[in-house]
Amino acid sequence: MSGDRIIIFDTTLRDGEQSPGCSMNTREKMEVARALVDLGVDVIEAGFPIASPGDFEAVTQIARAYGDRSTICGLARSLDADVQRAKEALKDAEKRRIHVFLATSAIHREFKLKMDKEEIVERAVRSVEQAKEFCDDVEFSPEDAARTEPDFLCEVVERTINAGATTVNIPDTVGYATPSHYFRVISHLKQHVSNIDSAIISTHCHNDLGLAVANSLAAVEAGARQIECTINGLGERAGNAALEEVVMAIHTREDYYGCQTAINTDRLYPTSNLVSSITGMKVQRNKAIVGRNAFAHEAGIHQHGMLQERTTYEIMKPEDVGFVGENLVLGKHSGRHAFRDRVQQLGFELDDEALQRAFDDFITLADKKKEVYDADIVALVENRLGDTPDRWQMVSFHTSAGSSSIPTATLELQCEEQPVICDAATGDGPIDAVFRAMERIMELTARLEEFNVRSVSRGKDALGEVRVTINVNGRHYHGRGVSTDIIEAAALSYLQALNKVAEDRRTQIPHRAETHPANP
């Protein structure tokens, strides 16, 4: 296998978005797409164009903006209308792929499709041929392949390759496979499909048994050369194979796998943070590769070994994945040049306008706290990534609360160039009062579903981060705010989420409901 390259196919924007509560709007998808391009992802599955006007718009914009740097892919069922819609969405991409799928397992044939084997083959071939008329790069997925009879799976794969499929994806749709089982599935195809060398074999593993990464790597051993995965392992139910884990497994154990990827591994940690911030899905502390504890060593014997030689207890270097600790870097007298150099060392490339906004935030922070850490810088920069001014801005706020008084908040907001609006509200705490006043001014009502607070660095004056998830008419919106004042951070996060609601209503681009058509 030496020298082989593994194609990384990211489906965060399609399958990852199907995690309950992880729906993204077009602007957020564009931010994630930019990060995936910078990460070096080979193929970006940007969405399911026929699923909704919002999905179609997102795929169209991503294809137009990034279709010359990464291959942009659109998903389609084996239906004429689906394939046609994918063609329309991808037409501006220089590098484009249509990904067609159709279930093949006995249980899906009987209970979902109510089709026999020959009908399945005919429809699969037709959809691949239709996609091939538009682009040379066509992928076919026999949905629930891991539970499909081996001989029938071979027939479908062989016929779709003959029809023009250049990639055949073998989904473990329900996370049923084990590594040895999945290895045998891929090996069987390699041995019994006469034209298998004319296409790339791909994996798409779900994590219902916690085996998605292990199964994907087993498939690589068997001859698969594309892995479909998501940032942070997002996806339906228990999620998909985590991109950061499969990439670093291949990178760290190149001696065993004999393969490489084109991923810029030092962008893994920042990309994980961005996706976590946008989707509102917090990364567990002990998550492999990108968790906050991934490079922490508490046990005394481990610490002693680390001081003598890092490799005694560390198989990867933190900088390999772009991990940022709490190194003290800057103070209030540090200039713009020093700030820019540190931002670049941390792996961020900002234009002059974005850099100035982040530097202004840094100066404000440095006036409030004595010590500014790398983690603080990252939080400030990430808070400005893809930053476009929201229509509603907070001008000022004031809260009062105590054991013998009613919590009250007074708030001033401004919508673009319109006059400042001031209002007040009471609540069962100062933060609740701020939220109520904000809803009154913006004439919106939301249900708060998640409220998470964490310290970005250490110390009593640490920068605090608040993430919220709100529900408006069954759709989830996420917000993030950072400040040394946790009430201000909460206000900023709630305002960001409400701004997304207001933008949706203003543009009136409907998004699909958080239930989705069957897919790989």
Image (cartoon, helix red, strand yellow):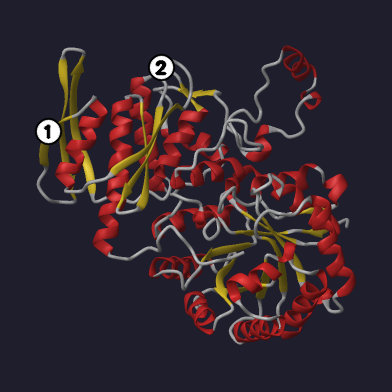
**SS state under label 2:** loop
Q: Nearer the viewer, residue 282 or 404?
A: 404
Residue 49 lies left or right of residue 224; in this view the side is left
Instruction: Choose the circle earlier in sequence order: 2 or 1.
Output: 2
**At x 72% / y 76%, what residue is drawn?**
166
Q: Is residue 317 visible?
A: yes
Residue 370, labelled with which disc? 2
Is 139 rendered above or below residue 515? below
What secondary structure is marked by label 1?
Answer: strand
So how many labels did they put on this image? 2
Residue drawn at 47 percent across, 37 percent down: 340
| Residue bearing mark 1 | 424
**Front one among 9 and 306:** 9
Q: Amino acid at mark 2?
A: Lys
In the image, which is nearer the foreground, mark 2 or mark 1? 1
Would you identify the image quadrant in which residue 24 lies? bottom left
2 and 1 marks in contact (CB < 8 Å): no
Image location (x, y in percent) of residue 131: 60, 82
What is the x, y in percent for residue 175? 68, 53
Residue at (58% x, 45% y) in the render: 232
Which quadrant is home to the C terminus? bottom right
**Picture coordinates of residue 240, whole percent (x, y):** 63, 52
On screen, residue 152 above or below 283: below
Residue 337 seen anywhere in this rendered image of the structure? no
Q: Residue 199 or 126: which is nearer the viewer? A: 126
The circle on residue 191 is none
Residue type highlighted by circle 1: Ala
